[in-house]
Image: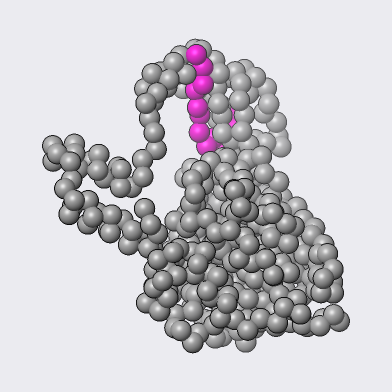
């Protein structure tokens, strides 16, 4: 069984104000070429189809182009934390007639189960389980105890309800923040460096231990979580400056008989415009300009002690798409060290407490403190603060 693993398409994404429609359209054309070349049995998409819950018209057009490019290859798609369930499931019944299966919510009733699609090859059946993005609040009405414990308890309980034949091959498609024990996945600067990412707490990968492959979504850098069979495929394009060093790709998985090692191959994703980071003096950075990178998206860090006025206009004579210009020299480092020496990241509760004290001139009392904790917990989907 051969399948493509994609995730975090983020149709409609912008990068520092630049519209990425052309880059995303180019990716779809490249995917179409790989589909024709490799002829996979299925395409798995592990969430975050859109970049916003209310996607713009161009984003919807891109999804339409993406679905057409599949050319009747079975596709299994789940919603991520950026997606709107109502919008993503539009046309679900019609799409299933064309081998496109979309799951947007976890089970909503005690007797409901995960959506499952079964394919078959010469080695037997492969069951694909679709587990869309979960917040405990989505299942609290029928799983109150598990919801109070968090995402990991919810996922474990949902999987326990499934009648999974572990003698056959099983694949799960899921969009959460998974870790391996104390080992946290490598994240970009755009992803929070805390125990949660994108509004979801860390879930230990051990809850998926019996699956033959876990198609993970949510983290933008391609990587495995503990074992090769637990994989974040990463984004197909660079969606932040911190992703500049990434080698973006499509993950292709080949599964043989049950118990045999899986084969993973990456198919390079070549963007219309790359995202590059340059650091050095103005003179040195200008010397890096050439016809290949002239239209790329460029992040510039200048180390000159004296930076001339109109420096952006000067650089745009060599690079057409400047994302940002950062000054990092002895003067700016001194200013930063003086101004943020006592800075620390505050939790939502700590930040509100500081705001309350500043505006009310006193600390919150016990009733006020309990109320704001309850409000923040509800907004965070039931996670303990």
Side (left or right) of 380 relative to 361: right
Q: From the image, which quarter does the N terminus lie in? A: bottom right
Residue at position x 72%, y 78% from top? 166
Whole-percent x and y of residue 333?
47, 18
**Residue that protrudes farthest toward the left in the picture:** 361
Residue 86, quarter of the rendered image: bottom left
Side (left or right) of 279 relative to 105: right
Reply above or below: 192 against 22: above
294 or 36: nearer the eye?
36
Magenta residues span 317-330
202 or 72: nearer the eye?
202
Whole-percent x and y of residue 12?
51, 58
Does the magenta segment cover residue 360? no
Q: Tell me which colouring the rendered structure shows.
A: one colour
Reply above or below: 121 against 133: below
261 or 216: nearer the eye?
261
Whole-percent x and y of residue 381?
38, 63
Does the magenta segment cover residue 327? yes
Side (left or right) of 127 relative to 160: right
Residue 356 visible somewhere in the drawing: yes
Residue at position x 36%, y 40% from top? 346
Residue 180, quarter of the rendered image: bottom right
Residue 23 visible somewhere in the drawing: no
- Number of marks in picture: 0
Residue at position x 73%, y 62% from top? 229
Whole-percent x and y of residue 259?
82, 71
147 or 68: nearer the eye?
147
């Amino acid at each position: 069984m051969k399948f493509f693993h994609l995730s975090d398409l983020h149709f409609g994404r912008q990068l520092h104000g630049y519209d990425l429609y052309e880059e995303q359209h180019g990716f779809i054309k490249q995917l179409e070429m790989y589909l024709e070349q490799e002829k996979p049995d299925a395409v798995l998409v592990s969430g975050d189809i859109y970049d916003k819950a209310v996607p713009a018209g161009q984003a919807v057009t891109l999804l339409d182009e993406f679905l057409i490019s599949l050319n009747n290859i079975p596709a299994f798609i789940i919603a991520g934390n950026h997606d709107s369930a109502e919008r993503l499931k539009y046309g679900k019944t019609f799409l299933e007639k064309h081998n496109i299966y979309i799951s947007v919510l976890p089970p909503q009733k005690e007797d409901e189960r995960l959506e499952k699609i079964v394919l078959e090859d010469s080695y037997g059946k492969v069951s694909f389980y679709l587990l869309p993005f979960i917040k405990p609040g989505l299942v609290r009405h029928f799983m109150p105890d598990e919801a109070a414990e968090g995402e990991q308890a919810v996922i474990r309980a949902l999987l326990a309800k499934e009648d999974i034949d572990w003698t056959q091959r099983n694949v799960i498609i899921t969009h959460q923040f998974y870790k391996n024990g104390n080992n946290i996945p490598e994240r970009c600067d755009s992803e929070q460096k805390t125990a949660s990412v994108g509004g979801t707490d860390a879930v230990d990968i051990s809850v998926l231990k019996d699956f033959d492959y876990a198609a993970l979504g949510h983290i933008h850098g391609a990587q495995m979580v503990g074992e090769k069979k637990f994989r974040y495929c990463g984004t197909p394009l660079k969606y932040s400056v911190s992703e500049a060093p990434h080698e973006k790709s499509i993950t292709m998985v080949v599964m043989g008989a049950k118990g045999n090692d899986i084969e993973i191959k990456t198919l390079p994703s070549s963007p219309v415009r790359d995202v590059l980071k340059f650091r050095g003096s103005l003179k040195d950075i200008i010397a890096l300009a050439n016809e290949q990178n002239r239209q790329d998206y460029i992040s510039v860090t200048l180390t000159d002690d004296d930076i001339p006025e109109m420096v952006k206009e000067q650089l745009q004579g060599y690079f057409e798409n400047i994302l940002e210009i950062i000054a990092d020299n002895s003067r700016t480092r001194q200013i930063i060290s003086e101004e943020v020496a006592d800075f620390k990241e505050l939790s939502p509760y700590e930040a509100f407490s500081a705001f309350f004290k500043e505006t009310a001139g006193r600390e919150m009392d016990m009733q006020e403190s309990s109320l704001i904790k309850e409000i923040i917990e509800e907004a965070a989907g039931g996670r303990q603060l």
